[in-house]
Image (cartoon, rainbow, N blue to C red):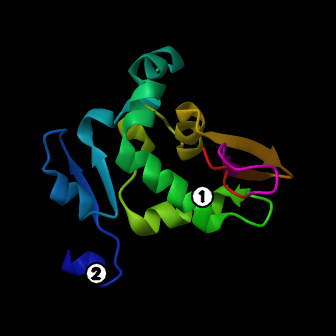
Amino acid sequence: MRILADGLKVYGFGQRKTPEPFVNACSLFTYVEGLGQSSASPETLLEERTDPRTLRGNTRLVLMMRNTVEAARGDDGWANFSAVRSQIGNQASLDPRNYGHRKLNDLFETTGLFDVRRKNQRLLVRDKRSGARGTPVVS
């Protein structure tokens, strides 16, 4: 915790049974069960992905994703994905491989809670709850 508080990156590795306080104390924590998936076939990776309903039910994950998109969004409601990725890296440990995805933007798309689009070599993301002008819609 002290190293993290000093602004340094803390990388952790462990099994799914790793205590949550340790996972939260890392800048990036990777579950060893998720390692080696990059060499897996696309069909295998699809089978191991976390179900979208399960992802949406993970309150901590969804809240973190929504907060980072909100913090990085522009007046139009869209956030540059590189800014979102940076915000997440500064706040918590989130490795998309822990959820069966190679890339963070795939994880955002899979939840079904975000719009993701490419515009002039940039990847943009916004919360689907946002209205046309980027203001949250009360539901």
Q: How many C-alpha atoms fall within 10 Å of the one at disc 2: few (<14), some, or many (≥20)? A: few
> Is residue 118 within the magenta segment?
no
Name the element at disc 2: helix
Q: Residue furthest right?
A: 120
Q: Is residue 95 visible?
A: no
Q: Which residues are magenta?
A: 125-134
Q: How many C-alpha atoms fall within 10 Å of the one at disc 1: few (<14), some, or many (≥20)? A: many
According to the image, label 2 marks what residue?
Answer: 5
Disc 2 marks which amino acid?
Ala
As drawn, is 37 to the left or to the right of 20? right
- Quadrant of residue 81 in the image? bottom right
Q: Residue furthest front?
A: 139
For the C terminus, the quadrant is top right
Q: Is residue 38 visible?
A: yes
Q: CA distance from mark 1 to mark 2?
A: 23 Å
For the N terminus, the quadrant is bottom left
- Quadrant of residue 76 in the image? bottom right
Q: Residue at x 35, y 81 (%)?
A: 7
Q: Main secondary structure of the magenta part?
A: loop
Disc 1 marks which amino acid?
Val
Q: Residue at x 43, y 16 (%)?
A: 47
Percent position of residue 121, x then y: 81, 52
Q: Residue at x 29, y 67 (%)?
A: 10
According to the image, label 1 marks what residue?
Answer: 69
Percent position of residue 63, x then y: 44, 52
42 or 113: nearer the viewer: 113
Q: Residue at x 66, y 42 (%)?
A: 128
Q: Is residue 84 above or below residue 130?
A: below
Q: Which dot, 1 or 2, sits closer to the camera?
A: 1
Among numbered discs 1 and 2, the one appearing first in the sequence: 2
Percent position of residue 86, x then y: 54, 65
